[in-house]
Image: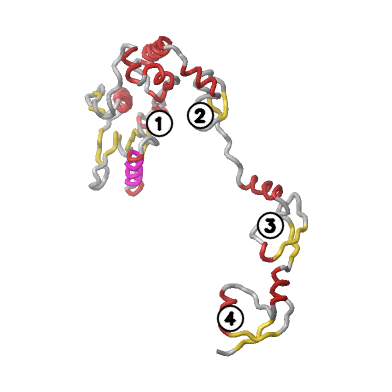
Amino acid sequence: MSDLLVHCSHCGKKILRRKGWVKENIKLKQRNYCSLKCLAEGRRLRVTIRCENPLCGKNIERVLTQLSPHNYCSHSCAMIVNNKKFPKRIALVKQCKYCRKNFKGGAIKYCSTKCQYLAAKISKDKLLKLIRTFYKKNGRIPFKSEFSHYHAIRGRFGTWNHAIKSAGFEPNPVMFAKKFIANDGHKCDSLSEKIIDDWLYARGVKHEINFPYPGNGGFSTDFKVGNFWIEFFGLSGQHKKYDELKFKKMNLAKINKLKIVEIYPKDLYPKSKLRNILGMLTGR
């Protein structure tokens, strides 16, 4: 195999190297050295660069092998720049379920372990009174997700349904096990869908229920008003299979360019927001 004449990457001396070695070095982006001494010196070769923190700009030396896409003189300078590029999430201000004090937290419902402990210590009589008060105010029993002392209920009665029965009410049926008849005669799968159906009926909005999506996928929308397809996603974010079904429906709507109106439990409870969401259907 023929040799090629190359220069030492450190001292510049001309040296002969096998053609295959030279090509391999070019492929691997490696340098050529005339001796082990030049190899060692070349690897220790330092360059002067500036710290990338604009507030610093200090000159620093780095060995070639230690250079990176971003170079800083210290961890402090690196943190200053990176914290500006990637700011930390600001925790949302929430209200403690027990003392009603505002605090910052993620999925935590209480501002302290003390409040969590006190919430679990609420007496049975007080819990039953809260359920009856809710029923008197709203005309129905509360859902677990909107009752602030759910953990105390579990601690005192064992299950949510036992507490509802003790308060003198009938628990909500298993999801979709019982049909709710709307004021216009439509059979709804849940109380929430009945509320939506009754809202449309009370305002004279003509609507269809369980209207099939285009194609043969077997999917149907909860309500259809003209060109609007109304979906109530009651279990969104709670069940994996439900979220997969939701994704498929939204994908079908996107493919067929359908006008989808999404409604969630927070839009119905504790205060109805249907006027804001469906107001355009009434023509008012």
Q: Indicate the secondary structure of the residue bearing disc 2.
A: loop
Mark number displayed over residue 33: none
Q: CA distance from mark 3 to mark 1?
A: 51 Å
Q: CA distance from mark 1 to mark 2?
A: 30 Å
Residue 114 in percent (x, y) is at 54, 20
- The residue wearing badge 1 is 277
Instruction: Name the kind of residue labelled 2 in the image.
Output: Ile
Task: Identify the coloring.
Answer: secondary structure
Between discs 3 and 1, the one toward the N terminus = 3
Between discs 4 and 2, the one toward the N terminus = 4
Dot 1 and dot 4 residues touching (CB under 8 Å) = no
Residue 173 in percent (x, y) is at 27, 24
Look at the image and give the residue range highlighted in magenta: 242-253
Residue located farthest toward the bottom when viewing the structure as drawn: 2
Mark number displayed over residue 108: 2
- The residue wearing badge 4 is 21
